[in-house]
Image: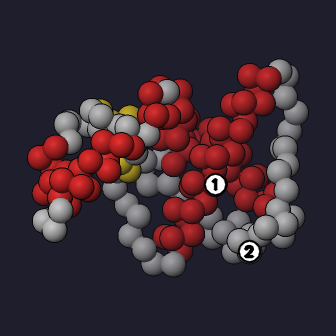
Amino acid sequence: MRPDAEPFDLGTFTDDGDRYAAVLQGVAFVERLCFDSLRRLGADVSGPLSITGGATRSHYWNQLRADILGRDLLLPADSEPAFGMAVVAAAGDGPLADTAARMVGPARVVRPRPAAVDRFTPTYHRFLDALCDRGYIDPAPSAGSRPEPEPAR
């Protein structure tokens, strides 16, 4: 963790919409960096990701995350965080996975678009290089060992 880290921009923006899209990309790049770091530590981070919360109502955000992560995103029928807590409460001392399976409706799947995954990968690597240049991360993620996203299914 780097409490001294400061925000930065890569490139120039034509307008506020362009800047907003870049901020969302940056958030998804940080998420990808987290998964890449876990993978380098030996964790199995394969498979689809289940996501919840109000942001799941944004088709643009869901598709962007799927494209940058190169992973399928599963959106439950009810994605509000309060519903998730209701599932936890209903499980009591029983198995949470079983309770979730009973209570959670079928998920919608957002699949990454292979061309978009390819388009975002060089920008992600540029982001990693910028983090390394600032000393915010160890150079290992970008020094020839850049993990690629899982292939789209």
Which quarter of the rendering shows the C terminus?
A: top left
Q: Residue at x 70, y 66 (%)?
A: 142
State the image coordinates of residue 82 (x, y, percent, origin top left).
36, 43
Eye-nearest disc, 1 or 2 = 1
Q: Is residue 73 visible?
A: no
**Crowding near pointer 1: few (<14 within 10 Å), some, many (20+)?**
some
Q: Residue at x 82, y 62 (%)?
A: 5
Q: Tell me the SS state at disc 1.
A: helix
Q: Relative to 58, say whether 102 is above or below.
A: below
Tag 2: amino acid: Asp
Q: Relative to residue 69, is residue 81 drawn left or right? A: left
Q: Is residue 135 visible?
A: yes
Q: Residue at x 83, y 51 (%)?
A: 7
Closest to the observer, 81 or 114:
81
State the image coordinates of residue 20 (x, y, percent, origin top left).
72, 30
Closest to the observer, 74 or 118:
74
Please name the residue that numbered disc 1 is placed on.
Answer: 30
Which quarter of the rendering shows the N terminus?
A: bottom right
Q: How is the image coloured?
A: secondary structure
Distance Cα–Cα, label 1 vs label 2:
14 Å
Residue 42's image quarter?
A: bottom left
Tag 1: amino acid: Val
Please name the residue that numbered disc 2 is placed on.
Answer: 138
Q: Tell me the SS state at disc 2.
A: loop
State the image coordinates of residue 26 (x, y, percent, origin top left).
69, 45
Q: Relative to 64, say whether 95 is above or below.
A: below
**Total count of labels:** 2
Q: Relative to residue 25, is residue 37 drawn left or right? A: left
Q: Relative to residue 22, is residue 39 drawn left or right? A: left
Residue 96's image quarter?
A: bottom left
Mark 1 or mark 2: whose residue is earlier in sequence: 1
Q: Which mark is residue 22?
A: none
